[in-house]
Image: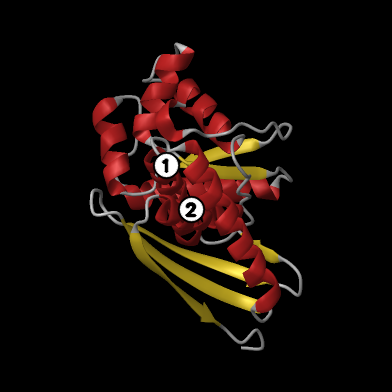
Amino acid sequence: MGKKRRRKTRRGDVIGMALLLDELDLATMTASYPSFEFDDYDRYLAVCEQTMRSMLGAGHRVMTGAFIPAEYSEYCQAEQLPPDSAMSRARYALAVCEEDEPFPYRGEPIAELVASLAHRERLRTLSIRTMDLLDPLPHGVVLEAEEHTADLLAWLSTHVGPGPHMFTCHVSDGAHDPLEVVAEVELGKNAMRAMSMEIMALSLMLSFARAARAAGGVIMRSFDPAG
């Protein structure tokens, strides 16, 4: 699906709902496709929430993802589908929800769900951007940086106290806009657990910082698991 580099993992038949993340995306859809009936973002979210709750109530599994207008256009081109079609939008939604890790809807408020999807989309975009910065660097240098990062994260898994931790990472090589990520990580006695997209974004940034000898820093905040 274009330059986003999604990876596809078949997970059986599910009902997929891909949601527009903000008013700007909705305005793009409204201006581009006459058959897209929504012109108010709050109404759009309310209808989506009602539909998903109804599907949950009927016993269906509902997987969600981000509906990215630019990606949708690329998808229709690649699949030779008419873009101004509800069926094409439904096929794109299912494709999005079959890729990467599933994001199940469990009945949470729609605003909370959209915020989570937007956060994941930012992580995905950041990871792709970092990979693009790593691509032109010498393979051996990148490999060494990746091994160093893996060792560092493994050391943290065994030497930092268990519980929730938040990593804030900022990297700049002086030639591009800075890279920034906030990753929430749960450390156990012998393991690091987190959303894999957060770990991926953090690992890529640390690898790029070492491989490019870029300036940057990492701040780790720890929280008392007992509250």
| Disc 2 + disc 1, Cβ < 8 Å | yes
Q: In the displayed image of the protein, which residue is found farthest to the front?
A: 140
Inspect this view and state whether residue 42 appears. Answer: yes
Name which of mark 2 and mark 1 comes first in the sequence: 1
> According to the image, label 1 marks what residue?
134
Q: Quadrant of residue 107?
A: bottom right
Q: Residue 198: horizontal and vertical position, in percent?
A: 53, 57
Cα gap from disc 2 to disc 1, whole angstroms: 8 Å
Left or right of 10, for residue 28: left
Asked whether the viewer can see residue 39, the reply is: no
Residue 7 versus residue 79 in the image, above or below: below
Q: Name the kind of residue labelled 1 in the image.
A: Leu
How packed is label 2: few (under 14 Cα within 10 Å), some, or many (20 or more)?
Answer: many
**Relative depth, front residue between 227 and 201:** 201
Q: Position of residue 169 (x, y in %)?
A: 42, 65
Q: Residue at x 41, y 46 (%)?
A: 130
Judging from the image, what secondary structure is the residue with disc 2 in? helix
| Residue plotted at (44% across, 56% down) | 210
Q: Callout 1 environment at 10 Å: few (<14), some (14 to 19), or many (20+)? A: many
> Mark 2 = which residue?
207
Q: Please say which color scheme the image uses.
A: secondary structure
Q: Nearer the viewer, residue 4 or 102?
A: 4
Label 1 sits on a secondary structure element that is helix
| Rendered residue at 54%/40% (across/down) | 17
Q: Position of residue 139 (x, y in %)?
A: 49, 37
- Residue 186 at what x, y percent from top left? 64, 70
Side (left or right) of 133 relative to 175: right
User: Amino acid type of disc 2?
Assistant: Ser
State the residue in front, 68 or 188. 188
**Residue, x 64% and y 44% (percent of image)?**
62
Left or right: 159, with 42 as reference point = right
Q: Quadrant of the C terminus?
A: bottom right
